[in-house]
Image (tube, rainbow, N blue to C red):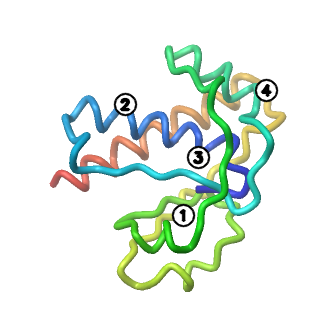
């Protein structure tokens, strides 16, 4: 999750969906995404960077995530800019702050770097879940 749900969290969601399918965990892992103040659309530079990996985000719409949804999670990954008070989520949820730069307005190379970092962290989280 992030504030706008228009960049990093959209990338993380797409990579998590791909990883869940690759590992055959569709019936075991639920993926939620959202922001505290969602934007109107996914950032164009993010759509373009993900398209380079054959991931289409053009039909995705940022959405708000609720405290109730977050409380239902085992893990919550924030992108480093959240307005979320993690104390509201509860002690049973493991919150990870990935502290990633916002790709909005960044040059294509920087967006790719952020994308690669997001992908690596998603894969590492799935490795941890399966361990």
Q: CA distance from mark 1 to mark 3?
A: 12 Å
Q: Residue at x 41, y 44 (%)?
A: 122
- Indicate the secondary structure of the residue bearing disc 1: strand
Q: CA distance from mark 4 to mark 2?
A: 25 Å
Confirm or deny contact between disc 4 and disc 2 (CB under 8 A).
no
The label nearer to you, 1 versus 3, is: 3
The label nearer to you, 3 versus 4, is: 3
Quadrant occupied by the N terminus: bottom right
The label nearer to you, 2 versus 1, is: 2
Confirm or deny contact between disc 2 and disc 3 (CB under 8 A).
no
Q: Residue at x 73, y 38 (%)?
A: 103
Q: CA distance from mark 3 to mark 4?
A: 18 Å
Label 3: few (<14), some (14–19) or many (≥20) C-alpha neighbours in 10 Å: many
**Image label count:** 4
Q: CA distance from mark 4 to mark 1?
A: 24 Å
Disc sitting over residue 97 in the figure: 1
Q: Which callout, 1 or 3, points at the residue further toward the start of the chain?
A: 3
Q: Which callout, 4 or 2, points at the residue further toward the start of the chain?
A: 2
> For mark 3, what is the residue?
9
> For mark 4, what is the residue?
107
Q: CA distance from mark 2 to mark 1?
A: 21 Å
- Indicate the secondary structure of the residue bearing disc 3: helix
- Indicate the secondary structure of the residue bearing disc 2: helix
């Amino acid at each position: 999750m992030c504030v706008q749900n228009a960049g990093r969290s959209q990338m993380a969601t797409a990579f998590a969906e791909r990883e869940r399918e690759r590992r055959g965990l569709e019936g075991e892992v639920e993926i939620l995404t959202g922001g505290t103040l969602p934007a109107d659309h996914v950032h164009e530079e993010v759509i373009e960077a993900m398209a380079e990996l054959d991931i289409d985000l053009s039909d995705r719409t940022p959405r708000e995530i609720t405290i109730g949804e977050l409380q239902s999670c085992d893990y919550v990954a924030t992108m480093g800019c959240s307005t979320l008070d993690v104390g509201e989520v509860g002690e049973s949820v493991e919150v990870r702050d990935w502290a990633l730069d916002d790709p909005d307005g960044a040059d294509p190379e920087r967006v790719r770097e952020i994308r690669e970092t997001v992908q690596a962290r998603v894969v590492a989280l799935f490795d941890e879940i399966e361990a």
